[in-house]
Image (spheres, grey):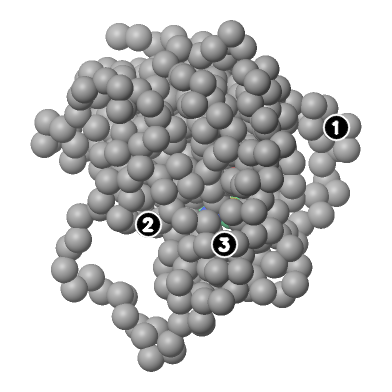
Amino acid sequence: MEMATEMARPASDAGTEGLTQADRVALLRYMLLMRSVESRAMTLYRQGKVPGSFYDGFGQEAVSVGAAYALAAEDRLCILHRDLGAHLVRGVAPARILGQYMGRAGGVTGGREGNVHFGDPEVGCVGMVSMLPDMMLVATGMAMAFKLRHEARCAITWFGDGSTSRGDFHEALNWAAVQKLPVIFVLENNQYAYSTPTDRQFAVNPVRRADAYGIHGESVDGNDVEAMFDAVRRARERAVDGGGPTLLEAVTMRMHGHAAHDDMRYVPPELLEEWAKRDPIDRQTARVAALDVDVDALRAEVDAQVETAVQEALAMPMPDPATATDGVFAEEAVPLGDGDAPWSGWSEAPR
Ligand SMILES: Cc1ncc(C[n+]2csc(CCOP(=O)(O)OP(=O)(O)O)c2C)c(N)n1
Ligand SMILES: [Mg+2]
């Protein structure tokens, strides 16, 4: 049994195995899209158009985009509050996401939830449960179903460093390990759980707990989108080949407050300055610009796309109060659908 807990390996700037030039540009495009959607949403929040609070993944775009990009259409996802990029890679339209934040009828949950607890079942995503990290158990359950049906597909979920001190984390890892389930656990270590730094959360790097459960654990540079892609591509292969689950620690930094209401005065400014130099979008921009791609034009195109989406979302009506109790109980079981799988590896290699 493989039980190596490896150190973070950055992807090579010469080109990551399996990625074409178009893939490398697409990875940048999805990260730009995530940042642009979230920065416009933050403005809408400050204008009083987003109820409650607003959570973003500024500086962590590589973790969700790189991981989701490695997935096949038939894989299934449990996406958390810092991982907007995964929704975008699966094909959820930015206007529906912005409508979601504003509680509009055209949002992903039809205005039932004006926040980050959403997932579009039509593209293989399960709506997020807020209790952390319950989605580890949901992903484990889906992986159990795939194994029982002998299906070559996997489930993935993301969760923060704060989740690793909860019982569900251990239960999910243990069961997935014992059953050798095709599931990928992405531990998003962004150095803080709300105001609690990691040195007050655990005395051992939680990725090392993979050894204790008998599964593969690996640290990845979470600010390198190609390294994230590569790690999840390998974890997926392991999962569908019967090699069992993987615990991936994506090492990153939460660059904004826990949510829009948090000024994070508890985070030392030097730490943020240090991490700003490792911005995942800047890093992928440098790679893509070296391929002679006009990154400024790409950025302008993405911003224009998001501006159109904002206008579309603002034009969406609020939900009809008469429909408030619709969907509380499922009338019929509708299976999750397949999502977009934009990686060229899926179109090039017959499966
Ligand atoms: C069981 C549980 N306790 C508390 C909360 C409230 N809560 C939501 S996010 C969060 C911090 C989570 O930190 P971490 O897991 O590191 O994820 P991050 O927000 O840093 O991405 C807390 C305490 C919750 N959702 N679930
Ligand atoms: Mg955290």
Q: Residues within 10 Å of mark 2 (few under 14, many from 20)?
A: some
Q: How far apart are marks 1 and 3 (CA)?
A: 32 Å
The residue singled out by tag 1 in the image is: 273
Q: How far apart are marks 2 and 3 (CA)?
A: 18 Å
Task: Say above or below: 3 vs 177.
Answer: above
Q: How crowded is mark 3: few (under 14 residues within 10 Å), some or many (20 or more)?
A: many
Q: Nearer the viewer, residue 302 or 2?
A: 302
The residue singled out by tag 2 in the image is: 120
The residue singled out by tag 3 in the image is: 309
Q: How crowded is mark 1: few (under 14 residues within 10 Å), some or many (20 or more)?
A: few
Q: Which amino acid does the dot numbered 1 rest on?
A: Glu
Is 148 placed left or right of 301 in the picture? left
Q: Which residue lies furthest to the left in this view?
A: 149
* Residue at figure coordinates x 30%, y 39% from the top left: 73
Q: Is residue 202 visible?
A: no
Residue 210 figure quarter? top left
Q: Which amino acid does the dot numbered 3 rest on?
A: Ala
Residue 141, position as x, y percentages in the image? 26, 43
Task: Say above or below: 208 vs 38.
Answer: above
Element at label 1: helix
Residue 189, position as x, y percentages in the image? 61, 33
| Disc with the residue nearer the chain's start (2 vs 3) | 2
Task: Say above or below: 219 vs 333.
Answer: above
Residue 300, position as x, y percentages in the image? 68, 45
Q: Is residue 71 visible?
A: yes
Q: Which of 309 and 260 is in front in this view?
A: 309
Q: Which amino acid does the dot numbered 2 rest on?
A: Asp
Q: How many marks?
A: 3
Is 189 placed left or right of 253 in the picture? left
Is 286 placed left or right of 272 in the picture? left
